[in-house]
Structures are given as structure tokens and as C-alpha cells.
């Protein structure tokens, strides 16, 4: 079954940057004293942006939507146009793995935060990684 015009319109309105989840995480990180860049490419030669970037620590944070990135806890597989959506979501997952591998090869650490995560807990996790990288630890 094909995707309806109504569904297509709803999906096209989904924000890809500055989502509520991303803003909540940024506020929580800022409140801990961390400073960062937003929507930057960690590697200029790779056309992929991190949502939050800690340049000197080489930490790139990606806030992944449960639907779009196939969250193991909350992913749903649409019944309408199922083949299209499965291909799309699996492609996103492959691209995420490729991004993580490319960053790791260049000395960066990719941190993935799911949209369902509590922003304060996610910020504490990110802060721990950033602090460890700043002090010379190599947590993977």
C-alpha cells in the first residue's frame, strides 16, 4: 500500500534540527558548564553533521529519533508502504554505523542519544565522555 498524501505531508513537517529533545539536551549540557558547537561537521570531508560537537575533546553527539533511526525499544514499522519505510530506516541505521566508524578512524567518538532518553541523564553521560576525553582517557 502506498503512503497517503496526508502521511507524506506529516512526515515532511518533521524537524531535523533544533528539535525539542535536542534543545532540552543542549540546555542540560549548558547548565553543567559545558560549551559546544551545534550542527557542525566533525570531519569536513564527510557530509554529515553532528547535532552537538565538542571539538577539542573530539566528541560528536547525535540525537536520534526513535522512528527514523530504528530504536530497538520504540521503533515502529509502518504497515502502509512497509517496504519503503523499512528500506529508509535500515539505510539510516547503515549510515549511522558508517558515520560512527569514520569518526572513530579519525580519532573522534560518536555518542548517540535516543529521543526517548531523559535529557538530564543523557547530559550526564555526554559530560562524562567529554571530561574523560579531555583528561586523556579513551573511553569507547
Image: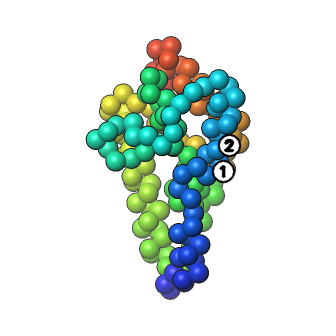
Q: Is residue 92 above or below residue 5?
A: above
The label number, if any, that marks residue 38 in the structure image = none
Q: Which label number is shown at residue 20?
A: 1
The residue that appears at 58% across and 43% down in the rendered structure is 113
Residue 84 in view, yes or no: yes
Residue 101's quadrant in the figure?
A: top left
Q: Could you tell whether 12 is left or right of 46 in the image?
A: right
The residue that appears at 45% across and 75% down in the rendered structure is 83
> Where is residue 32, by image quadrant?
top right
The image position of residue 102, as x and y in percent, is: 33, 39
The residue drawn where x is 63% and y is 58% is: 74
Q: Is residue 75 above or below residue 122?
A: below
Q: Position of residue 128 (x, y in %)?
A: 60, 24
**Residue 72 shows in this picture:** no
At x 49%, y 29%, the residue is 54
> Percent from the top left, x then y, of residue 29?
64, 32
Q: CA distance from mark 1 to mark 2?
A: 6 Å
Q: Residue furthest top?
A: 135
Estimate how packed mark 1 is, as few (under 14), some (14 to 19) or many (20 or more) residues with alpha carbons within 10 Å. few
Picture layout, residue 56 above or below residue 8: above
* Colour mapping used in the image: rainbow
Residue 61 horizontal side relative to residue 48, left or right: right
Disc 1 vs disc 2: Cβ atoms closer than 8 Å?
yes
Residue 24 numbered mark, or none: 2
Q: Position of residue 66 (x, y in %)?
A: 59, 56
Q: Secondary structure at mark 1?
A: helix
Amino acid at each position: 500500500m502506498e503512503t497517503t498524501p496526508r502521511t507524506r505531508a506529516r512526515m515532511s513537517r518533521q524537524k531535523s534540527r533544533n528539535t525539542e529533545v535536542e534543545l532540552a539536551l543542549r540546555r542540560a549540557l549548558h547548565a553543567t558548564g559545558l560549551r559546544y558547537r551545534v550542527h557542525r561537521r566533525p570531519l569536513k570531508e564527510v557530509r554529515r553533521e553532528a547535532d552537538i560537537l565538542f571539538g577539542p575533546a573530539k566528541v560528536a553527539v547525535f540525537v536520534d529519533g526513535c522512528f527514523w533511526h530504528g530504536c530497538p525499544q520504540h521503533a515502529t514499522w509502518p504497515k502502509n508502504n512497509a517496504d519503503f519505510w523499512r528500506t529508509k530506516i535500515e539505510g539510516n541505521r547503515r549510515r549511522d554505523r558508517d558515520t560512527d566508524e569514520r569518526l572513530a578512524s579519525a580519532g573522534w567518538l560518536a555518542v548517540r542519544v535516543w529521543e526517548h532518553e531523559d535529557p538530564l541523564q543523557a547530559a550526564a553521560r555526554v559530560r562524562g565522555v567529554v571530561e574523560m576525553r579531555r583528561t586523556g582517557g579513551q573511553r569507547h
